[in-house]
Image (cartoon, grey):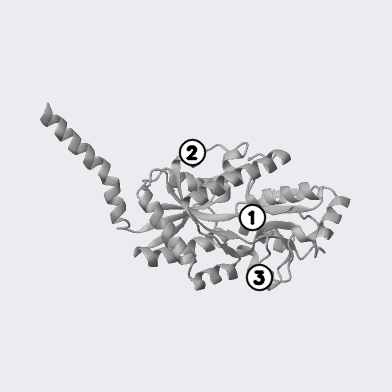
Amino acid sequence: MRKWFLVSLTALMVFCAAPEAKAQNWPAQPITLINGFPPGGGADILARLFAEKLRDALGQPVTVENRTGANGLIAAAAVAAARPDGYTLLLQTMSIAATSVVMPGVTLNFNPDRDLAQSVIIAGLDNLLYVSTKTPFTTVQEVIDYARANPDKLTYGSSGVGSSYQLWAAQFTNMAGIRMVHVPFRGGPPAIAEIIAGRVDMMFGNLAEILPHIRSGAVRAIAFTSVPPSPVLPGVPTIAASGLPQFAADNWFGIAAPGATPRPILERLNAEVNRALQNPEVSQRLISLGYQPRGGTIEEMLATIQRDRAKWKGVIEANNIRAE
């Protein structure tokens, strides 16, 4: 009996020590970073930049894989179902971590809190309202005045029903007391194409994916949703300074892993991302692309998720937003 007990205890100790041993040897093979949004968008730009930084820091290839659809939830579900060994990661977004949980009509086949383990917020986004050059608008007040005189005539694009782009617009229309028509797309780039063509009037989107089109003159920047405004476009004001002083809307990207991923792996990812963000060349590169370098601890990321859930739950309920 005693011999059997000792053998069982030894086996149990080996079993429990296995994840820790694997974590200490991580990474020993290539890593896949899954991004739930299309190539060329703000998420993809950031994913590829930090895949390169993680490759250099970890000594293993880091490949970005785009799995689009359902506002990033298809990618999130794939990571939630993956082996928790640190070799499959998610480019986490505010919409996946925060708004999907409080969005009516969203059916989740995983639990974001249990099945995904948060590691680090990489960066916030400089977000702004921009319009088609086929429209006459140059200021926030011009948009508001026209929308008040012509309810439901102006259209705004988004990267999908329930996306952060739609939520920013809903907050704007609430505060301004106007009505506009929502036109959802499968990601930001398809919506941008329609705005450039003049078939959609405007969008609340991120600077990273629209900046080249602003510089080329294909679209017109009106005002930043985030505070403070980006130094990349010094002449563009904030919505808060343009007649809606309480308006503020931001977004962020980070890294998450399958829920049972060992804590040492999450902490190593956190440390490497924070180390990269402390490099002036990296931080200035992010700023030039339209990002706000963030970083911070795992606990700070968890607190941000809870804060954003509470904020956007109120916007969702006030506008009766429901995922299709």
Q: Position of residue 79 (x, y in %)?
A: 44, 47
Vertically, is 79 above or below 142?
above
Q: Residue furthest right?
A: 149
- Badge 1, how many Cα within 10 Å: few under 14, some, many 20+? some
Q: Residue at x 43, y 52 (%)?
A: 89
Label 1 sits on a secondary structure element that is loop
Q: Residues under labels 1 and 2: Cα distance?
A: 24 Å
If you read the primary sequence from the N terminus, does the residue marked by circle 3 or circle 2 appear first? 2
Q: Position of residue 233 (x, y in %)?
A: 68, 70
- Badge 2, how many Cα within 10 Å: few under 14, some, many 20+? few
Q: Quadrant of residue 232?
A: bottom right
Q: Position of residue 218 (x, y in %)?
A: 70, 68
Judge depth for marks 1 and 2 and give the one in front: 1
Q: Residue at x 49, y 41 (%)?
A: 113
If you read the primary sequence from the N terminus, does the residue marked by circle 3 or circle 1 appear first? 3
* Residue denoted by label 1: 250
Residue type, numbered disc 3: Pro
Residue type, numbered disc 1: Asp
* Residue denoted by label 2: 111
Image quadrant occupied by the N terminus: top left
If you read the primary sequence from the N terminus, does the residue marked by circle 1 or circle 2 appear first? 2
Q: Residues under labels 3 and 1: Cα distance?
A: 16 Å
